[in-house]
Image (tube, rainbow, N blue to C red):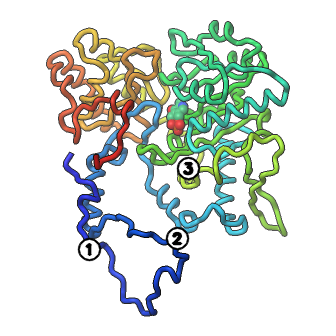
């Protein structure tokens, strides 16, 4: 990796700006600000001309992999292309220059946007109310779990278990534990759906709720929802749906209509905000009637005053779980999601899901002869292959296949997850990829399956074309050192 740090590229006295001469008398800094607030030493900022700054960051962006470069089939992450108009609206000065401490009277546009976005999300998922506060999917899960807890507390129920199906996303058990619950795993059956006998056996009077990811992490729609709903509600428990994969359901079916009491959305996935670098995200939570009174405060409300529609923040909800975040959530992501939904409309949203589903099924059909498929069924937005065959027959593991894909110019799929699939390769093409792109990716995967048979050493030595070669991933997580100037 040849690119130097921006601090090493810095040369004293170089600059990227020019200002006209001062036409007022210059005053010493300590006349303008109390001296206790002034720096003792100048900030150590890099000094560079604009051209060098631009080139440095363009070179860095070329070292990186991103959705603007090529397909990013990272399963369960919905790395679709994000339309640039979302960033345009988010950068409008009226939004970008706002301060969260601004009074309601000068924040009416932002409040209206939040109110309307929550209304649209309610409609999309058939929920009774939505909070926009949580900052990511997992944060939405924790919010949902705290709502469930409050619901049972208010009824005087002592229930300390959450059931989580083992095809659920890994954040589900983690959130259950963070919410103070004992997490009990429910198996999935040979078809990839919840094992109903195991569910019946584990659903006792201690269970506060069942958490289900739908479509689940092997890309399969849980077909026994009506039966599950009856069982769970009949037991006095609530039903949580992990709705991070809404790009498979938009305009086709609604969790609220299926009887779910609480779900989170991932705006940064399904509703298109860039999230490859880890954030910011947004994980709104939708609830059924049972949970509305417990939602976090403040709640954005619409009212009429002197014949005019106005918006306000209401913090006066006696049964609320409180705040889940300072201020009102990650507002910039809300603006992007609002733009995305308004640009597409109801028909466009349905096409999103239709394309996500057909893309996943097309790609699956192209690959199914070459890799093992543990759950041979039509899928929703993603599918999960197994590298078992390559491992057993040629000594090439899923990790090696993922590394080799980098040489072919692709980001790797999600690997070794879900845990119920050995040597898992979880692939989510998303709806934004054209047939030619899907074909090119399939060709690369097939070429790697051939290499596994003929020249496995090439795969074992991959990647060769990336800025850094194979990293020790265990060391990276055990001895994290992100400081460059060692
Ligand atoms: C991504 C994802 C999550 C977690 O969302 P974050 O925003 O990464 O916290 C939860 N569940 C599912 C199914 C997901 O795909």
Q: Quadrant of the N terminus?
A: top left
Can residue 443 be seen? Answer: no
Q: Which mark is residue 37?
A: 2
Q: Is residue 25 left or right of residue 328?
A: left
Q: Is residue 477 left or right of residue 128?
A: left
Residue for point 50% across, 80% down: 30
Give 359 or 467, whichever is nearer the viewer.
467
Say whether mark 1 is within 8 Å of ligand 1.
no
Q: Is residue 230 left or right of residue 8?
A: right
Mark toward the viewer: 3 or 1: 1
Residue for point 27% across, 68% down: 48
Give 468 or 472, whichever is nearer the viewer.
472
Which residue has dot 3 on it? Answer: 337
Residue for point 72% across, 44% down: 296
Q: Secondary structure at mark 3?
A: helix
Q: Which mark is residue 13?
A: 1
The answer to whether 45 is drawn above or below residue 211 in the figure is below
Q: Residues within 10 Å of mark 3 (few under 14, many from 20)?
A: many
How much space separates mark 3 and mark 2, taking CA atoms?
A: 39 Å
Q: In the rendering, at what x and y percent does residue 323 appear?
A: 70, 46
Residue for point 21% across, 25% down: 447
Q: In the rendering, at what x and y percent does residue 221 appear?
A: 55, 23
Give 438 or 167, whichever is nearer the viewer.
167
Q: Quadrant of residue 287?
A: top right
Q: Earlier in the sequence, mark 2 or mark 1?
A: 1
């Amino acid at each position: 990796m040849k690119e130097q740090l921006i601090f090493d590229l810095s040369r004293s006295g170089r600059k990227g700006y020019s200002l006209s001469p001062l036409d007022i008398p210059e005053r010493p800094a300590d006349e303008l600000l109390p001296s206790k607030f002034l720096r003792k030493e100048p900030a150590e900022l890099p000094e560079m001309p604009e051209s060098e700054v631009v080139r440095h960051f363009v070179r860095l962006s070329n070292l990186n992999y991103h959705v603007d470069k090529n397909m990013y089939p990272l399963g369960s992450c919905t790395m679709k292309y994000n339309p640039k108009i979302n960033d345009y609206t988010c950068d409008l000065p009226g939004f970008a220059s706002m301060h969260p401490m601004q009074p309601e009277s000068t924040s009416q546009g932002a409040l209206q946007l939040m109110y309307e976005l929550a209304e649209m999300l309610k409609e999309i998922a058939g929920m009774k109310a939505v909070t926009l506060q949580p900052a990511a999917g997992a944060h939405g899960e924790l919010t949902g779990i705290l709502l469930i807890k409050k619901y049972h507390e208010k009824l005087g129920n002592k229930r300390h278990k959450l059931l989580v199906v083992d095809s659920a996303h890994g954040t589900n058990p983690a959130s259950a534990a963070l919410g103070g619950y004992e997490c009990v795993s429910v198996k999935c059956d040979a078809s990839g759906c919840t094992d109903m006998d195991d569910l019946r056996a584990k659903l006792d009077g201690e269970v506060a709720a069942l958490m289900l990811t739908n479509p689940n992490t092997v890309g399969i729609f849980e077909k026994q929802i009506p039966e599950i709903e009856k069982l769970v509600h009949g037991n006095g428990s609530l039903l949580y749906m992990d709705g991070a994969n809404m790009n498979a359901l938009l305009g086709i079916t609604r969790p609220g209509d299926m009887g779910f009491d609480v779900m989170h959305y991932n705006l940064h996935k399904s509703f298109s905000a860039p999230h490859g670098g880890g954030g910011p995200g947004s994980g709104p939570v939708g609830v059924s009637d049972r949970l509305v009174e417990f939602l976090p405060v403040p709640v954005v409300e619409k009212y009429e005053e002197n014949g005019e529609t106005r918006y306000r923040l209401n913090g006066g909800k006696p049964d609320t779980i409180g705040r889940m975040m300072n201020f009102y959530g990650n507002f910039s992501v809300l603006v992007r999601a609002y733009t995305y939904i308004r640009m597409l409309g109801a028909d466009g949203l349905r096409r999103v899901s239709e394309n996500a589903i057909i893309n996943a099924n097309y790609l699956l059909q192209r690959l199914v002869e070459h890799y093992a498929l543990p759950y041979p069924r039509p899928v929703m937005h993603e599918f999960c292959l197994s590298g078992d065959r390559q491992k057993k027959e040629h000594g090439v593991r899923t990790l090696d296949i993922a590394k080799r894909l980098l040489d072919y110019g692709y980001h790797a799929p999600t690997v070794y997850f879900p845990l119920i699939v050995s040597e898992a390769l979880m692939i989510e093409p998303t709806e934004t990829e054209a047939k030619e792109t899907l074909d090119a990716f399939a060709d690369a995967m097939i070429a790697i399956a051939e290499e596994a048979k003929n020249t496995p050493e090439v795969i074992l030595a991959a990647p060769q074309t990336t800025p850094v070669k194979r990293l020790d991933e265990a060391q990276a997580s055990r001895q994290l050192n992100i400081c460059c100037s060692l």
